[in-house]
């Protein structure tokens, strides 16, 4: 896989689906810096959309099962350059190790902090779930100079919702995921028109890294997590109405 092939594949996919994208606040995208992209997540199209919006490849951490399911594995990892997380026991360690290496080599890393739930349960397009804090820990311990955490909102303006695959089928590939141990179908959200709104970057400064120790660590992690979630939530309100 060449460095730019995920971007090429992303643009081809969106063109094939005849999706129209409107971008806002592009001037907020950091240049000549390591970037950790944080975004809301409802559709299989989210990663390609973010790559096209930023005009650069983004290495996304994705759920373990995506690296196990045939065909999906070839598209997600082989063509789009995502890196699946390990099984539950080593998931966090794997995420930090792979992401740190990518950020240190000046690649853009992408994270969907809502996790798997909004992908396997139908959610309203203007709502956003709670954020897991792993991305904040990554940003504060990455030891990368000029690191920007960039919140981006994907606001659906027109979409089609269908049911794709029984959820229990995915448990064959990842039996550790409780969300797959239930009746129902994996939803498939296909965007037709979408707004991509770039938030204000949160720059990781030496004082943040100094605070990331002892009792202060919890406070600075919560601050970064809440900042990104609130920034995306506010952008969604603007983009969806």
Image (spheres, helix red, strand yellow):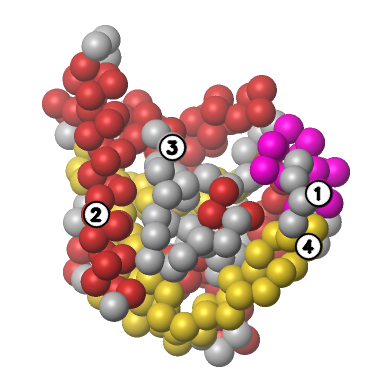
* Residue occupied by mark 4: 165
**Can you give x and y, in whole percent of width and height, for residue 131 in the image?**
40, 42
Q: Tell me how far mark 4 sits from mark 1, CA to CA.
A: 9 Å
| Residue 119 badge | none
Q: Nearer the viewer, mark 1 or mark 3?
A: 1
Residue of label 1: 168
Q: Nearer the viewer, mark 2 or mark 4?
A: 4
Per the image, label 2 sits on a secondary structure element best described as: helix
- Label 1: how many residues lie within 10 Å, few (<14), some (14-19) or many (20+)? some
Give the residue at mark 3.
132
> Distance from label 2 to label 4 (Cα)?
33 Å
Q: Residues within 10 Å of mark 4 (few under 14, many from 20)?
A: few
Q: Check disc 1 and report its element: helix, strand or loop.
A: helix
Residue 44 belongs to the span the image colors magenta: no
**Relative depth, front residue between 133 and 213:** 133
Q: Which residue is mark 2?
A: 231
Mark 2 or 1 closer to N-term? Answer: 1
Start-end of magenta stretch: 167-180
């Amino acid at each position: 896989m060449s460095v730019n092939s995920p971007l090429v594949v992303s643009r081809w996919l969106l063109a094939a689906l005849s999706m129209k994208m409107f971008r806002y606040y592009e001037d907020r995208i950091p240049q000549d810096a390591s970037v950790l992209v944080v975004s809301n997540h409802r559709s299989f199209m989210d990663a390609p959309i973010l790559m096209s919006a930023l005009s650069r490849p983004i290495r996304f951490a994705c759920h373990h099962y995506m690296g196990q399911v045939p065909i999906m594995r070839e598209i997600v990892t082989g063509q789009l350059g995502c890196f699946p997380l390990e099984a539950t026991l080593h998931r966090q360690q794997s995420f930090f190790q792979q992401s740190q290496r990518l950020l240190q080599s000046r690649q853009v890393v992408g994270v969907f902090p809502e996790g798997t739930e909004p992908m396997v349960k139908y959610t309203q397009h203007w709502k956003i779930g709670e954020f897991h804090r792993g991305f904040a820990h990554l940003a504060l311990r990455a030891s990368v100079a000029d690191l920007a955490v960039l919140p981006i909102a994907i606001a659906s303006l027109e979409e089609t919702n269908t049911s794709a695959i029984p959820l229990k089928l995915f448990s064959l590939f990842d039996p550790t995921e409780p969300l797959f141990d239930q009746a129902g179908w994996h939803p498939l959200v296909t965007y037709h028109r979408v707004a991509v709104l770039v938030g204000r970057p949160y720059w990781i400064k030496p004082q943040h890294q100094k605070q990331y120790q002892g009792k202060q660590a919890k406070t600075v992690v919560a601050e970064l997590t809440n900042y990104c979630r609130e920034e995306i939530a506010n952008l969604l309100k603007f983009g969806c109405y």
